[in-house]
Amino acid sequence: MTEMLYCYRLFDRHIFSSHELKMLHRVNHEMEPDGRDVLLEWSSDPVLPEGPLCAGHESWGICVLRAAVGVWAVLPRTGFVVWVPECGTRLTVHPDLSQLADHETMTLPCRDVANSLVTGLLSRLPAMWGELPLHTAMLKAPEGLILLTGKSGVGKSTLSQLLARRHGWRLLDDDACMASIYGGELKVTPMGGKARLRADAANRLQLSGPLLSGYADGKIMLNVEHSALILPERKPVAAMFHLSRNNEDSTNHTSNSSICRLDTINAVIQASTTALTLDRESIPWRTNRFRVATQFGKIANYSVRYDQTQTPEEVTDNIEKIYAKIH
């Protein structure tokens, strides 16, 4: 009897898995994987991953170890590790012997392996395909695509939801996308993952969804529209907004918020910091990162700094005003 495989959208490809990946959008039609698609296999054979650390950090939800013909992607606090060959399309999940020894003494809550696999590994997988994964939220505005960049926790998801609700922009992904260059032109594709928000932000926006395990600040996965399954038509990137928070512990209650346009050099530098990888020493990845960042440097880039004196609604209104000026 053939094992049932779930099929999901992953950037501009599909991923097939015998276990559910609830943070991705399921594709409801029968199909067989082709050479571009990803096959995720689940093995009961435990392994002990070895190799030098080449990317990631436990706080990021992934630690990547370099091997001879691929990488080991360790998913902290799950008890599992994933073998990723150089092709990046035939992945195998194994119990991780190095984590099992510490499993009973962990002070932090365990994370769901399927959810960690999506957020920690699959968001970075295009680096193995010769593409450039980016840690950005992606929206579709009337005149083109808008990208919001910034460190985890800076507010990309909350601001994306507000831009969609208050200004009618379409939210394509609130965490990751993939950049490619074809024929000298920049193409950006959303990962297609389901939106996630901290519980307090979701309550503020009156949004609901199931609680995700293993997050100290409490995160929920939002219920989404079926239209999110449809790949967006190709649009140019209209602008990038690089988000950062001022020191929230400061006793100074005077607003230090600002929005300023970046010159080309600083735009390229900021764009390059959004790139994700599974091996930071990879020469092809570094070359691709420079090529893509250079293309991003040609569009409108803005630094957006805000603090506790500004509400998220005020920040998004300022972003929309900037967008209206350049279009």
Image: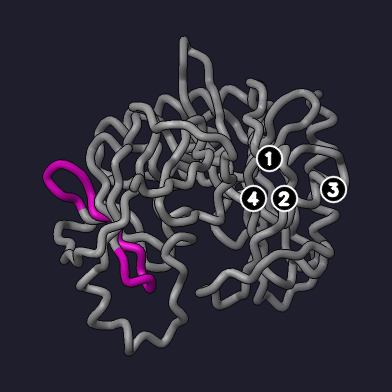
Residue density around tag 2, few if under 14, some if 14–19, many if 20 or more, within 10 Å: few
Cβ atoms under marks 2 and 3 closer than 8 Å: no
* Residue at 32% across, 29% down: 287
Residue topped by disc 1: 228
Can residue 27 be seen in the rendering of this structure?
yes
Residue 305 percent across, percent down from the top left: 68, 53
Q: What amino acid is found at the position of numbered circle 1 in the picture?
A: Ala
Which circle's residue, 4 or 3, is located before the other in the chain?
3
Q: What amino acid is found at the position of numbered circle 3 in the picture?
A: Arg
User: Which quadrant of the rendered structure holds the C terminus?
Assistant: top right
Q: Which residues are magenta?
A: 66-80
Q: Residue furthest top?
A: 183
Q: Report whether 295 appears left or right of 284.
A: right
Which circle's residue, 1 or 3, is located before the other in the chain?
3
Could you tell me which secondary element the residue under label 2 belongs to? loop
Residue topped by disc 2: 224
Residue 194 percent across, percent down from the top left: 62, 51
Residue density around tag 4, few if under 14, some if 14–19, many if 20 or more, within 10 Å: some
> How far apart in space, not on screen, are marks 1 and 3 (Cα)?
15 Å
Q: Nearer the viewer, mark 4 or mark 3?
A: 3
Q: Which label is found at residue 165?
A: 3
Height in image: 303 above or below 326?
Answer: below
Q: Report whether 133 appears left or right of 298.
A: left
* Residue at 25% across, 52% down: 83
Q: Main secondary structure of the magenta part?
A: strand
Cβ atoms under marks 1 and 2 closer than 8 Å: yes
Q: Quadrant of residue 130?
A: top left
Residue topped by disc 4: 243
